[in-house]
Every structure is written in structure tokens, then in C-alpha cells.
Image: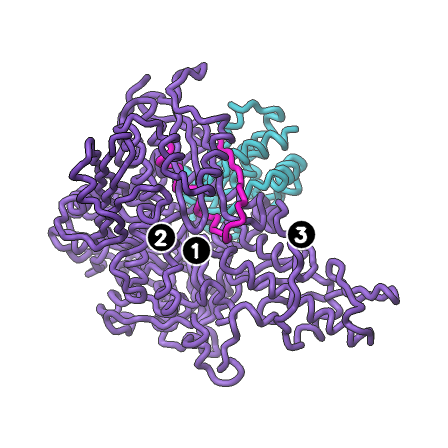
Amino acid sequence: MTEITVNGRIHEVAVEPETPLLWVLRDTLGMTGTKYGCGIGQCGACTVMIDGQATRSCQVPVESLGAAKVVTIDAIEDDEVGRRVVDAWVSVQVAQCGYCQSGQVMAATALLKGNPRPTDRDIADAMTGLCRCGTYNRIAEAVRLAAG
Amino acid sequence: MSSFDHPSFTAAAGLVRTAGVTNVSRRGFLGFGAGALVLGALLPSGGALARAEGPAAVAPRPGTRVAAFLEIGPDGSARLLSPFVEGGQGISTGLAQIVGEELDLHPARFTVDCAPPGPDYAVVNGLRLTGGSFSTRSSYGVMRRLGATARDMMIRAAAVRLNVRRDELATEDGRVVHAKSGRSLGYGDLAADALVLKPDEAVQLRDPATFRYIRQPMGRLDARAKSTGKTVYPIDQKVDGMLYAAVRHAGHLGTEPLALGNEPEVRGMPGVHSVHRLPGAVAVAADSWFRARKAVEALDVTWSEPRPTGIDTVAADYSSGGMLAALKASKEAGIPAEKDGDTAAAFAGAAPTVEAEYDAPYLAHAQLEPPSTIARFNADGTLELWVPNQMPEVFQAVASGIAGLRPEQVIVHSPTLGGFFGRHFMYAPANPFPQAILLAQATGRPVKVLWSREEEFLMDAVRPLSFSRFRAALDGRGQPSAVEVRTVGEGPIGRWFGEVIKSPVDSSAVEGLVEKPYAIPNRSFSFVKLAHPVTIAFWRSVGHSMNDFFYEGFLDEIAEAGGRDPFELRMELLKDRPRHRDLLSAVADLSGGWRRGPYEAGDGRRARGVAMASPFGSETATIAEVSIENGQARIHDIWIAVDPGSVVNPAIVVSQVESAAALGVSATLFEEMAYEGGTRQARNYDAYPILTRDAMPRIHVRIVESGAPMGGVGEVGLPGVPPAVVNAVAALTGQRIRSLPLSKARLSGV
């Protein structure tokens, strides 16, 4: 049994210690808002916040978490910055297929929590998730809008 | 003309070839005869549902039976059962606008779900599919009438309830209002009475001058759910008691698993339920997907040998380079695809002539959601599928064949797709649902099959590698007097619908080359079919994705040979085409006036290229601005003027054009699915680079509504991008790129 803290709740999960957090979230805890895209840390669809840092959950063995606090897209609107990011995403009409946007919103929230007034360079450095619908310009616009 | 407009396609649309499945059947797994055709429940006259007993025996005219499309809740909210699959293109929102406009119910009060299979939904020329940029243009009139018919039913029900004359009643956003008495009834109160009335299709449609929702840039209905992780995609579906299955496919398409060296050990791994051999693959079912995948990766599989050589199969030495060489080396006489005038005479007197060969690579869809399917056999003998698809009735029909059931015993759920771009048509070996059915049968449990990203890049059906050879004759003024094009290859229409259409010329192989608007008097275009051994696909904008690059690139070569400015030459060749001239003027205006360059732009030299395209019933004009950095093209801005005739939601049109343009940039700069030694070289995004934020240009879109018949939207932003970029590169560097992607070429710094 491994104990992990997700969205403020402690869960006991019976999985192999090397199991990536992504699959614990999706298959063990049934929290499917976090997406599987590539499994090699390239696409960013699985991005969650771990102790406030945007992290690709497909690359995080569950055993490495310890007492770290995981926040997923499922709880994004409980966070004040997260809610602002979501509102900006809706306002700018970023999403098309929407599959990558869970990860994009998490990356944007983590960015703004650590850096409330990011420059365009900061946005480019932080927002590295792939989007096959090509919504990159709107993503940047929404981050700027959420930053206010 | 778009591929699916073909009259014989419409006439015989119920027949769909499922080559991969029949290949599988020859191995004894699936019970179809070789070369079998699967009859889809697609046509009012011949579908499987139409043959059913009872009330279903008479098929409705598609798009007319209100109760098949609309459910009104007690609170007055509406659920619209859509003929179309939503996968990012915004069709659900557009339909809510169209139906809401005529029903008189605000679009925000709709939820929209993809309808189950059924003849009611065959609204695309008597067929049902989500593709070909067809959804809005094919169903606009039908869906308006449906909304108006439903509104009329509400009024009739209210007239009875209030005991007043119908013509004293009006509607007001979800209510029927009797102004005289001040009484009103909500649609929610009336729905039960209204929806059992006989629809009257002769109802009056709303005067477009009074539209409140159609033509408005309304927000998408799914924007918030998609920004909060709440949208449930195929991969997110879950049913009680299901097993998770992971699959490993043969590296060489067409080979089979012969032996599993360590099956007992793998069966003993944590969580593993069972180990399976499938056609062309092995699978493990387990209590979680990660465990299933670990186990299937651990399997020691001996595969059968591919054929040593050749291009009839994916042989041991098959390569994309070898395939391109075969396309170029073909000596077979072509079948005419377009012919006008006397090219031979034009070439005889011409000076100079221009010749060039163009090619474009295999491309993966690379949609972010890997494909999956849940299959569950229910106690009542039905099979239930949660399956990504663009043609529910075809999937139903093929699934029923695999499971040994009648089509109506297969329940198909078509969830919102995490991108598709043509990925989820019936591509036999490239669809996971047959595996889910076989595994559910083998285990006696519901099974969710999910392909890893690596398996997806291995098995995805690809945009065909393509090749055309061009020749042009110029007259004394530098005007093209003749063009010859020879195209060798195969398109997805021929592959997957060829037995239906039986047209010798594959429209999906030549679209973008033929039926151009330019006044070139002598034309001779031919097509030679040379089949690919790999699984080929529809890919956003299909034949236009490469052919407009070929043609418009070559047109710039003609301009250069004749000493003409490429923009001015196009204007002149379009002298009798006011719609196209207007569009070309519009894009020039949008970009601040045409200038080719090269010119100084502060941080270095830049140049611009222009291209036009006529995809899917719409027209586009595109200008791109590029510079060169470290031997590679950097695209700064793309300006696109698009004329789809008329639009429903201008904001979604802009988004779709931006998105298609981004995919065009990606294909122009980076993408290629290469084969070497009979296997694909890229198995994930690290080896198959797609457009990232760094390379994303600004994209500026102007919608021109000429009032021409409504054209497509979802794919039309793409075709002009590759040629506009390549033409800009030529203007800047003098290097004429005739083979994509650009990343293969080292461009000269300037």
C-alpha cells in the first residue's frame, strides 16, 4: 500500500511502486481528467501540480511522491488562480478537441501561482505542452488574460 | 468538387469495403468471406434497420423525425441527438445554433450528444459520416427545418392546452406565449404532448434577416467542460467489471505472432488476467492498463517473417524512399483525370517549357488521444461498444460481423473525440475495436483496449505518400498556355470506398490538381493507380493536403520562368473569376498589401508567398511570411482569406481555420512517417515531431461570405499553407522546395 495525497485527500493505493502517478490517478482512483498522451513526458497532457510545480505525471513513479501534495485538473476550480485560468480559457475559447487542455490549464495555473506577471518569454518557457489542434496562440492569450 | 459528392458514392453509400477485416477473415478469425462487402445501415432504401420488422420497417426520411433528434427536459432544456461526432470542430455548438434558431430556444440551453446508429441520421447525401468538411453544409437546411418543425409542434400542443387558435400563439426563447391572455407555457411543459404530434414539414422557416443565433460568434457549449477536465473521451469511459487490455502489434504489417516464449511467466505477473493472440498482435488483459502494458511488453513473441522484398506487401526491405522511387519509375499509361484543349500543339510551339516533380510523405494523424474501445456483451445478447468513430453505422455493421450478431444487436456509443483529423474512419487494421470484441468474447468480461502511443504510431493509417510530375508551356507573354500533370499513387477513397465508387480516377488522389479556377486553355491531367502496401487514410484536407502544395508551388515556378510576379499572374489567370479575384484581393489587403520581397524586417530579411485553394466547396487565399534561421524556415505570419459562401458561427470558423493552418505549418516544416526495413521509424512524438509553440506563427483570418453555396470549414485552412510557405522560401532564398517536409532541406541563410 502506498499513501498519496491528491486534491487534499489521502488515498491508499495498492499498486507496484514504479507505477506512474498518471495511471494511479486514471485507473486506480478513477480521476480521468488527467490525460494520457505519450507516456514519455513529451506532450504534457498528463500535467498535474506536485507541491505547486507543473509536473508530467506519466514520469512520476508513485513511490517517489512521499508526502507531496498532488493537485489535478479535477480540483482546478477549488483554486483561486485555477478558477481564473479556467475563466480565461473559456473567455478566449481556447479548446477545440480539448484533450490536451487539462494539462495546459494545469501548466498555466502553476506558472501564475509562482509568477503572477509572466513575460511572453516566461509563458513560452512554461507552456510547452503539445496541442494537435494548434491552439498555441490562444493558450498564450488566455495566460496573459488570467494574469490580468 | 469534394470526394463524397461523387454521384455514384451517394448512390451506393451503404457499401463500404473493409479490406483489413476481410484480410483478417482469411486467417479464420472473423467469419467474412474474402473481398466481402459490408452492408451498412445507411440508406433509407436498403439499410439493415430498414429491413427490420415492425415500425422500423419503414425508414424515415433522414432528418425529419423530430423525436429522434430532440428531447426536452421538464426544465425546458434540450438534448439534441446529433448526426455528427464532435471532435473539436465545434459541430455540436453549430447545430445547437441552427436548431435553436428555428426552435426558438437559446443554444446555451442545449446539450448535444452523438446519436446512436439509425436511418434518421443519414443527412449527408443519404449517408452518415463526420468528415469531408461536410457536417454543417450538408445538414444546414435539414436541421433548420427540424427546429422549425419542432417549434410548430410546441405551438400546436399549446393551442390545445390553452384552447386558443394557433395563429394567436408566438414563441419566446423556450416558451409558447399567448399575448392576448397573457398566458404562456414552457417547452418543458409541452414536450410530452408536442413530440408525439405528427411533424408538419411544410412549416415556415425564419427570415434570415431576423436571425439571433445563426451567424453569431457564440461560445462553444463544451468550452468549460474541456477547460476543467470534465469532458469524457473514449479513453475515459468505464464500465463495471471491465478488464484493461494492452496490445503489441507486429512490427511488419501483415505478419503474425507464431509463438510466445514466456507465456506462463507473463500470466503470473501482477494483476494479469490472461494472455491472447490476435490477428497481427498479442494482448494481455489485466486489472489495470499499466499492468497489462508491462506484461504485454514483457512477452517474448516470435513473429512470422515478412516477404523479403517488393512493394505489394510491407516487405522486409520496404521503405518510403523505395515507394517514392516506384511511384516515380512507373511507366504505366495514365487515365485522364481532366482534359481540355490541345496540350501537344501548345507544347510544340512553346518556349520555354517548365518541368518539375513534387512529392509529399506519409503523415500520421498524431491526435493527442490514443485510440481505445470498450466492448461489452450484455445478458440480452447485445454487444455494446464505446468506440471512437466517424461513421457509427459502418462500425456497427462491421462489429456485428465480427461478433456474429445482427447490426441492430450492436449498440454504438460515439463519445467526443480527443482530436481526429480523419483518424477514426474504418481502417480495418488501424482500429482497436475488433480486438476489444475478440477479447471480450475470449474473457467473458467487458474489455477496454487502449493502444499505447507507440502502438498508435505503429498502426495509425497514414496520409499517403504522394507524387506528381508537372510540365507547362509558356506563351510569348510568359503566360502558361498548357499544363500537364501525371499523378501516380493511391488515395483513401479508392482504398476504402473503391468498390462502391468504381471510378477509375481516385478523386482523393487528384483533388487539388484538377478543377482549378485558372484560365489555362490546354490541360491534360492523368492518374496512374499504384497501391501502397501500408494502411492509408483520410488526413485533414485529404488530397488537398499535398496536391495544392504541388500545384501552387509549380504555378510559382511558371511565374518565375515567365518573369511574372506570382500574385499578378494569379490575378490575370483569374480574370473571369470574380469570386477568386475578390478573395485574392482580400488576403492581400489583410496582409497590408501584396509584396513578395525579399525585404528587410529589422531582424533580418523576409519574403512572402501566396497560394490559392478550392477545397471542400470553399475557396481560400493564403499569404505566408518567412525568414531563415539556422538553415530552417521560420514562419512569422500567415494571412488567410476564406470564402465558405456563408457561415453559422464565425468564431468557430476562425478557430477551425487557425487550427487547420497550424496543422499545415506542422506538415510543411516537420512531419514525415518514414519506413525503413519494413517498419515505421517513429513510435512517439520524440521521433515524429509535430508543431510546438516555438514554431507557431501568428495566424490572421478574414471570412468572406460571397453568398455562394455553403462550403466546408474544418479542413479548408490547410491546403494553402504549404505552398504559400514554400513559395515564400523560394522568394527569399531562390531554393525551390519540391519535397516536404522543409526540415529535410538546408536553406541558405540570407
Mark 3 nearby-residue class (10 Å; few <14, some 14–19, many ≥20): few
Which residue is nearer to you in this view: B553 or B197? B553
Asked if disc 1 and disc 2 are in contact, CB closer than 8 Å, the reply is: yes
Amino acid type for the residue under numbered disc 3: Ala
Which residue is nearer to you in this view: A50 or A68? A50
For the point 70% across and 73% down, which residue is it?
Answer: B194
Q: Looking at the image, is B19 positioned above or below residue B225?
A: below
Whichever of labels 2 and 3 marks the residue nearer the N terminus, that label is: 3
Considering every residue shown, the one lying at the far bottom of the view is: B54
Considering every residue shown, the one lying at the far right of the view is: B181
Chain drawn purple, letter?
B
Q: Which residues are magenta?
A: B698-724
Q: In this figure, which residue is indicated by the disc labeled 2?
A: B538
Q: Chain of mark 3?
A: B
Q: State the scheme by which the image is colored.
A: by chain
For the point 52% across and 51% down, which residue is it?
Answer: A32
B407 left or right, relative to B202: left
Q: In this figure, which residue is indicated by the disc labeled 3?
A: B209
From the top left corner, tell me how far across and down residue B312 is, in percent.
Answer: 16, 55
Whichever of labels 1 and 2 marks the residue nearer the N terminus, that label is: 1
From the top left corner, tell me how far across and down residue B385 is, in percent.
Answer: 45, 66
Whichever of labels 3 and 1 marks the residue nearer the N terminus, that label is: 1
Q: Label 1, label 2: how many angstroms apart (C-alpha)?
A: 9 Å
From the top left corner, tell me how far across and down residue B725 is, in percent.
Answer: 37, 31
Asked if the stretch drawn in magenta spans residue B151, the answer is: no
